[in-house]
Amino acid sequence: DAGVTQSPTHLIKTRGQQVTLRCSPKSGHDTVSWYQQALGQGPQFIFQYYEEEERQRGNFPDRFSGHQFPNYSSELNVNALLLGDSALYLCASSEGLAGGAYTDTQYFGPGTRLTVL
Amino acid sequence: DAKTTQPNSMESNEEEPVHLPCNHSTISGTDYIHWYRQLPSQGPEYVIHGLTSNVNNRMASLAIAEDRKSSTLILHRATLRDAAVYYCILDSGGYQKVTFGTGTKLQVIP
C-alpha cells in the first residue's frame, strides 16, 4: 500500500500564475481533504471532497478550487498566486464515515512545497 | 469550531515518559479528541483518538479528564524519533472540518 501520494514535491511559481497540485488517496479511501501549512503554523483546512463533490470548505478565497475524480484522486488549483500562498500543501485521505464510524482518521501525504516569487 | 490549547514546546530526556497536555474547555459532547504528530519534513501522522475513556495503542496512551475539558497524550518511553510537533484536535465527525492549532514541539534530549 503506497499510502497517500502527492505531486509534485516542490514547485516554484511567480505571482499571478496558476498552479495545480495532485493527490492520490490511500487505497480504500474515498474522502480527500486539502490543507495549507505556512511555516511554523499548524495545517489550515481548505476543503474536503467526497463523491466528486466539495463537501466542506474552510476560510479560503475562491482562488482555491479543487476537483475529485471517479478514482478518488484529487487536484487542488490555485489561481492568481500571491506571495502569501507560499506554503506546504497537504492532502489527507480517509474512509469517511463509512460503516457507521463516528469519527474519521486522516492519513496525510508528504505535501507539496509551493514557493511563490 | 471548538478550540484546543497546547504549550508551545516541551523537553524530555530520552527513555523517560512524556506527558503532553491539551485543554479543550469548549468541547461538545460529540467531539472526539484526536492526536496527530508531524515529524520534520513530513505530513502529520495519526497517533491516537478517544471520546470519553482512556485509550491505549502501540504508539501512546490518551488520558481524558472526567469532564473532558482536558486530555493528556502519554509517550511511555520517549525516543529520539518521537521529536516532533504534536497536535491535539477535536473532530465532531459528521463530515465537519478539522482545525489544527500550532501544536507542541517536543524536543527529546539524548
Image: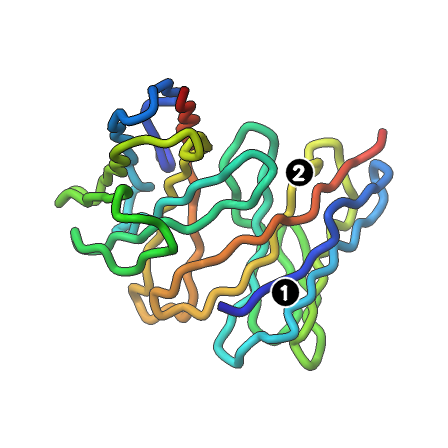
- The image shows residue A86, relative to residue B12, as above or below, that is above
What's the residue at 67%, 52% (across, down)?
B60
- The image shows residue A35, relative to residue A86, as above or below, that is below
Q: Which mark is residue B84?
A: 2
Q: Which mark is residue A41?
A: none
Name the amino acid type tagged 1: Val
What's the residue at 62%, 63% (across, down)?
B4
Q: Which mark is residue B55?
A: 1
Image x and y of residue A99, in percent = 30, 67
Task: Name the mark nearer the viewer: 2 or 1.
Answer: 2
Q: Quadrant of residue B39?
A: top right
Q: Quadrant of residue A79?
A: top left
Chain ID of residue with mark 1: B
On screen, residue A4 versus residue B38, left or right, reads: left
Res. A110 visible in picture: no
What's the residue at 41%, 68% (across, down)?
B93
What's the residue at 68%, 70% (across, down)?
B64
Image x and y of residue B102, in percent = 61, 48
On screen, residue B46 versus residue B69, left or right, reads: left
Name the amino acid type tagged 2: Ala
Pointer 2 and pointer 1: residues touching (CB < 8 Å)? Answer: no
Question: In front here: B68 or A101?
Answer: B68
Can you say which quadrant of the picture contains the C terminus of chain B? top right
Q: Are marks 2 and 1 on the same chain?
A: yes
